[in-house]
Image: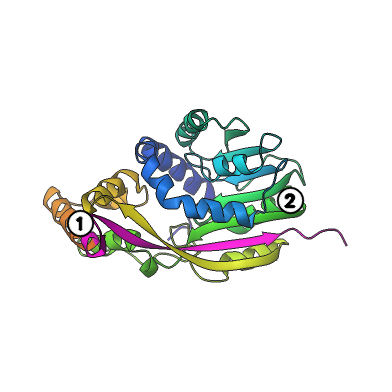
Amino acid sequence: MAAVKPQDVIDTQRQDWNRVAPAWEKWDDRLDQNMAFVNHRLVAEGRLRAGQRVLDLGSGTGYPALLAAQAVCDSGRVLGLDLAEQMLHAARRKAERVGVSNVRFQTADVTSLPFDDASYDAVLSRFCLMFLPDIPRTMREVVRVLKPGGYFAAAVWSAVERNPFISIPLAVLKTFLTLPPPDPDQPGIFRLAKPGELYGMAQRAGLTGLADDEMTGESYYESAEEYLASLLDMAAPLQPLFAKLSPKQRRDAEAQITEAANRYKQGKGVALPMAIRIVSARKPLPA
């Protein structure tokens, strides 16, 4: 089988994330509520403070860039990058709505950062790096644009079995479709799930490793039906798989996903466990 070209991966992902951008904006409040603890952890690991310049890789609809902008105060500046311009339109609308003016958003491929050396105090990234065709190259770029003593902090998904809100639909789809095992060297949701993987890449790029932790939480929904609706709207990597099902198979799959999600009932809603790997590192100071 011919190797997938990196530019083809980037082009496909740009199309996919632009396509689902309206859904991400539609579900924005729910997503921000469920991921707030991740955003705050990244800002903490980045040691952000007033007056700093911060780069956010894969900003999507605006987080953690918006929280970072609040952390660096009016004297600081934050730039959020993403492949999908439609996602960034939503981020700009959100920034205006919440009154954050020291952040801007720019369309860019984060594997080649268009910035001067040593131009940022911190680089953050939430659920972006595992989708890149060349992660080591991006990490070298991160090191290049960081100032000496600057911090890097990233969140990626931990193991699939630790994340029912993703593993449930995958398990159901496997009963209808033959899904090949994921290539560990190709972009994907769980590409960086193994302990030490991203941490090691950061070290090999020239950073001093600080943390490689699994952080757990829960993704809350008012009902299993709300969870299913958001999944079908937002999950760009899964949508091509659902499209392969016949109408009856799709109805059956949706019923099975809802039934599985209801096993995580908590009060009147459902709370689906999440496990996230948090990696942080620092660019060494000159000797």
Residue 159, quarter of the rendered image? bottom left
Q: At 42% from the left edge and 41% from the top edge, which residue is drawn?
A: 17
User: In the image, is residue 45 part of the stretch drawn in magenta?
Assistant: no
Residue 115, quarter of the rendered image? top right
Query: Of circles 1 and 2, which is in front?
Result: 1
Q: At 75% from the left edge and 43% from the top edge, which residue is drawn?
A: 119
Q: Is residue 36 visible?
A: yes
Give the residue at mark 1: 258
Per the rendered image, the range of residues in magenta is: 261-287
Q: As drawn, is 184 to the left or to the right of 235?
A: right
CA distance separating discs 1 and 2: 46 Å
Badge 2 marks a residue whose secondary structure is helix
- Give the image location of residue 212, x and y in percent: 58, 68
Q: At 37% from the left edge and 51% from the top edge, which residue is drawn?
A: 237
- 131 versus 50 height, above or below: below
Badge 1 marks a residue whose secondary structure is helix
Q: Nearer the viewer, residue 6 or 270?
A: 270
Q: Which colouring convention does the figure follow?
A: rainbow
Q: Is residue 131 visible?
A: no
Q: Check residue 144 in the rendering and tell me which mark sits there, or answer none.
A: 2
- Give the image location of residue 201, x and y in percent: 63, 64
Q: As drawn, is 47 to the left or to the right of 260?
A: right
Amino acid residing under circle 2: Arg
